[in-house]
Amino acid sequence: MKLLVRWVLLAAALGLVANLYSGVMVASFGSAMVAALVLGLFNTLVRPLLVLLTLPVTLVTLGLFLFVINALMFYWAAGLLDGFGVTGFGAALVGSLLYSLCGVVIDIAMERLFPQD
């Protein structure tokens, strides 16, 4: 149940990002659901590999390169899906920052809604 609630909230957050920032477009809530799923899969499967491969650059930039990796995940998901789009890499960077902030708020809310026993 917790996973489904988080998925729906992240899809709603993606819709919020699209409404707040004109560089991100989401066609419908169904598209946002699919995009949230794809972003979750990318962040689970691809992101750890990219973080490992770019570890020297990440260390030199004191972790700021992780923002670029997040933007790449956002940009690639938008390129893969029809109902979700970004206008460019800069828009993907801003969109991924807003989406990440929403994700932090959602994670805090989920901890309060579903406390660990």
Image (spheres, rainbow, N blue to C red):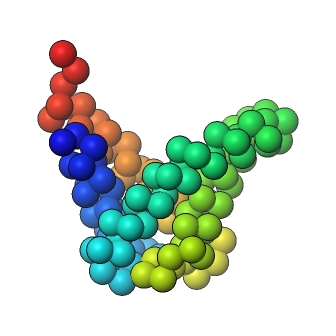
Classify the position of the N terminus by image quarter. top left
Q: Nearer the viewer, residue 111 or 105?
A: 111
Q: Nearer the viewer, residue 20 or 72?
A: 72
Residue sticking out furthest to the top: 117
Residue 17 placement (x, y as % from top left):
38, 68
Tell me: 116 left or right of 45.
left
The residue positioned 40% from the left and 60% from the top of the image is 36
Q: Quadrant of residue 27?
A: bottom left
Tell me: 9 left or right of 46.
left
For residue 82, above or below residue 117? below
Q: Nearer the viewer, residue 56 or 101?
A: 56
For residue 9, above or below residue 104? below
For residue 107, above or below residue 30? above
Residue 81 placement (x, y as % from top left):
50, 76
Classify the position of the C terminus by image quarter. top left
Tell me: 57 left or right of 51.
right
Q: Nearer the viewer, residue 53 or 59?
A: 53
The residue positioned 43% from the left and 67% from the top of the image is 35
Q: Quadrant of residue 18?
A: bottom left
